[in-house]
Image: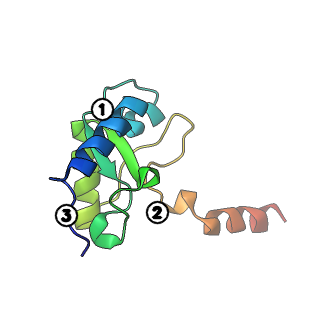
Amino acid sequence: MAKWPYNTTRWKRLRAQQLREAPLCAHCEALGRLVPAHHVDHIQAINDGGEPFDMGNLQSLCASCHSHKTNADMHGTPLKGCDANGNPLDAGHWWSSNDRANNEKISQS
């Protein structure tokens, strides 16, 4: 496991930078809602090999979305709902997969 970063000065600065650059919850914004973010989440968990200080691995979330995502990550529970374009929030959902695209090509033949 990577060294836990949350009590470091580096993390505190990075967290503040993330919230300055993306002050709204990424999940709520995808649903068309403008909700202030107060949490900074690692898209790929540190325990799963995610880089703790990589801005590309961070997203701003509200408390509710952060709790739902953390629960989904810990217990394998998929995220429920769709974004403003109708795409599932859960990237692992079958609708988002390549299998769906392949099945649609076959059915159109």
Q: Which residue is mark 1?
A: 37
Q: CA distance from mark 1 to mark 2?
A: 24 Å
Quick one: label 3, few (<14), some, or many (20+) residues within 10 Å? Answer: few
Q: Which residue is mark 2?
A: 92
Most extreme residue toward the left is 7
Position of 99 with respect to 45 (left or right) is right
Quadrant placement of the C terminus: bottom right
Please report the residue visible at 58 percent of the width from the left and 64 percent of the height from the top: 97
- Identify the mark nearer the N-term, 2 or 3: 3
Position of 10 with respect to 51 (left or right) is left
Position of 77 with respect to 26 (left or right) is left
Please report the residue visible at 40 percent of the width from the left and 44 percent of the height from the top: 81
Q: Quick check: 46 above or below 42?
A: below
Most extreme residue toward the right is 109
Q: CA distance from mark 2 to mark 3?
A: 27 Å
Q: Where, by quadrant of the figure, is residue 74 drawn?
A: bottom left
Looking at numbered disc 3 in the image, what kind of residue is underneath it?
Trp
Looking at numbered disc 1 in the image, what kind of residue is underneath it?
Ala
Q: Secondary structure at mark 2?
A: loop
Q: Which residue is mark 3?
A: 4
